Image (cartoon, grey):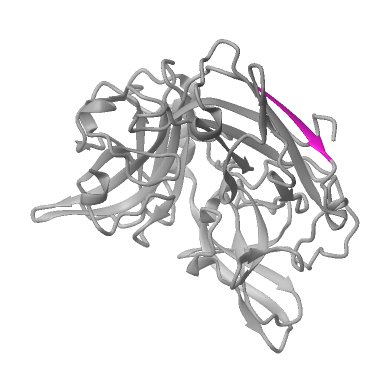
Amino acid sequence: MFSQVNKKTVIYDHVYVDNIKSVELKKRGTPFSLPIIDLNSRAQLTLSFDDLNLEDKHYIYEVYRCNKDWQASELDEIEYLEGFNGEELRDFWYSNGTVTPFTHYRLDIPNDDIRWTKSGNYVVIIYEEFDDGKEPVLTRRFMVTEDQLTVKADFVTPIGVSFFKSHHSININVLHKNFNITNPMNEINLTVLQNGRWDNAKKNEIPRFTKLDELVFNNIDAFVFPAFKEFRSFDIRSLRSAGDNVHSIDLHDDGTDVLLDLSFPRFGDNHLTYLDINGQFYISNDDNNRTGIGGSNGRSARENMSINSSTSADYANVIFTLKSKRLEDDVYIIGKFTNWEAQPEFKMEYDEQRKIYICETPLKQGRYEYLYGVLTQDGLDFDYTEGNRFETENEYTILVYYSEFGSRHDRLIKVRSINSNFLNR
């Protein structure tokens, strides 16, 4: 059982050691995809990360299944995996021409060593192995899906008057004409993600009622999300010239300081529509994109160029500043690159003299999107730092779980993504 593997291990996206940076898990060859893969497809997921500690390491990976609530599955490994856990990470490259040295690791799953046989929620864990045991290094969630149903979705006006201009509300219908469901009220439930986030997901919603072969999920305000504003962003693909929202770049012998443009709270600003990638990030080096990585291992030239960019992209000390009054609660930088969490390295400190919040943190060359969030007793709050406007474009992912009566596992039988700007409200 996963829960017995290591008591330190958690079943959410997490990095356990400071030397591991720039973790990404996505469908192979698709830069902004969520870690979702079809059960019987030939596609793969790609996990990549950097180790800034250059000591010799022995990393292994293990895959475990979870239920719909991200608790350890009751199934034994043999019931959902073909192959063996504990295989070594074999693909790695050393940084090339960077001031900050690192080792870049990559894992493609499923592969010849391991393959899953059931849909549902999974977690991949990277361990560092020692003579006397192993310690977790990072954890990443992913999902394996079937295509058994049809999902219809519409954006509607929220019931609450105070939400009209600030929130998105979704009505969902599930059609199951060719998929027999004996007791839909107990066997089917939905989870909806906003921009791939689990921290504010709407989970375990059951149908409000059924009609023929259709399940209706129009529960009052069940799937209502604050719309936020379009994401803030900055571009450090080049460290030779200032990219978007970069104020200045200071190159020195032992590294690079990047000062971003001064930010301001946006709660009172009018809505401004512009293209973003919904809080994602991607690694890229425009200064030194050389070709010619040896040993393709069946990879395309495009993938080899991506690996080359990852090994030649350097780290810089990025300085965030937010002009604001001092708030009662702490302010954090939040985005996919922070695991959507309030992490210590992204906590902002207040400068009383200049009346600004400041945070300095190392980030790899690329493009990043983020929001400023205030950590309250009830969780992250963005009302003051960002505000909400219903015109904001967001991506929503609908997950349909099937827990058949008498079964010991939850199947993920449909995934559908919708965009708030491409469906009628």
| Picture residue at 21% right of the left edge, 28% below the top | 78
Residue 133 pos. (x, y %): 13, 54
| Picture residue at 66% right of the left edge, 37% below the top | 396
Report the number of discs. 0
- Figure check: 326 above or below 243: below
Q: Quadrant of the N terminus?
A: top left
In magenta stretch: residue 154: yes
- Please report the bounds of the magenta region as a residue range: 151-156
Location of residue 232 by image quarter? bottom right
Which is more toward the observer, 400 or 272?
A: 400
Q: Quadrant of the C terminus?
A: top right
Task: Residue lying at the far right in this picture: please name it.
Answer: 270
Location of residue 284 by image quarter? top right
Residue 180 pos. (x, y %): 51, 15
Whether residue 373 sits left or right of residue 43 in the image: it is right
Residue 3 pos. (x, y %): 26, 50
In magenta stretch: residue 214: no
Residue 96 visible here: no
Which is more toward the observer, 397 or 359?
A: 397
